[in-house]
Image (spheres, rainbow, N blue to C red):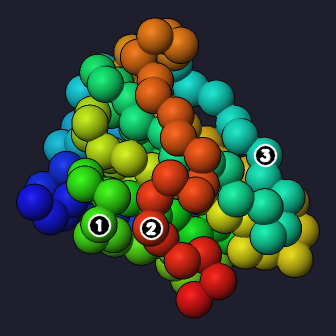
Amino acid sequence: MNTQSKVVFTPLKRIAVDGGDVLHALKASDPEFNGFGEAYFSLIQPNFIKSWRLHKKSTLNLIVPVGAVHFVTTLDGERFEEFMLSDQADYGRLSIEPEVWMAFQGISDRQSVVLNIMDRPHNPEDVERLDLEQMAFDWND
């Protein structure tokens, strides 16, 4: 099964404003909005890869307002989809439904920031994790 039906990339507006741009993230009227549970930021260092995780019940809405991040998703550990999000031309939101594996790598020359807007509060029992080596994705490619 292809993850396309469970993973959606949405280009977002970046509005030029004197003194600093405004970057849209998520509106209640967006089709990917399933309610609000929690929002948090993850920091990721250049070239670091955060290992595989799967949320059993939560939908993730990922935005990179600072830096650049390479996201990889899979349903089965054999077929992978790749997405590049940054605060530049490819600024957008990656919405990931439950039961999709995801890992990500900082690809900027500085620390990157990932904003995650979830539809339910974080619950450690909702998350499964795997080491990077447990999936056949080549991060050096």
Question: Residue, x 78% and y 46% (percent of image)?
Answer: 43
Question: Residue, x 42% and y 42% (percent of image)?
Answer: 61
Where is residue 126, by image quadrant? top left
**Mark number displayed over residue 136:** 2
Pointer 2 and pointer 1: residues touching (CB < 8 Å)?
yes
Locate the C terminus and report the quarter of the image it occupies. Answer: bottom right
Tell me the crowding category of disc 3: few under 14, some 14 to 19, or many 20 or more residues within 10 angstroms, Cα based. few
Circle 3 residue: 43
State whether residue 93 appears in this view: no
Question: Is 129 situated left or right of 57 in this image?
Answer: right
Tell me the crowding category of disc 1: few under 14, some 14 to 19, or many 20 or more residues within 10 angstroms, Cα based. few
Q: Nearer the viewer, mark 2 or mark 3?
A: 2
Question: Is 131 situated left or right of 4 in this image?
Answer: right
**Mark number displayed over residue 78:** 1
Tell me the crowding category of disc 2: few under 14, some 14 to 19, or many 20 or more residues within 10 angstroms, Cα based. few
Q: Position of residue 32 (x, y in %)?
A: 24, 42
Between the residue at mark 2 and the residue at mark 3, the CA separation in whole angstroms equals: 25 Å
Question: Residue, x 19% and y 50% (percent of image)?
Answer: 6
Pointer 2 and pointer 3: residues touching (CB < 8 Å)?
no
Between the residue at mark 2 and the residue at mark 1, the CA separation in whole angstroms equals: 7 Å
Between the residue at mark 3 and the residue at mark 1, the CA separation in whole angstroms equals: 28 Å
Label 3 SS: strand
Where is residue 68, by image quadrant? bottom right
Q: Nearer the viewer, mark 3 or mark 1?
A: 1
Label 2 SS: loop
Residue 62 higher or lower than 21, as above or below: above
Nearer-N-terminus badge (2/3) = 3
Q: Position of residue 86 (x, y in %)?
A: 62, 70
State whether residue 56 appears in this view: yes
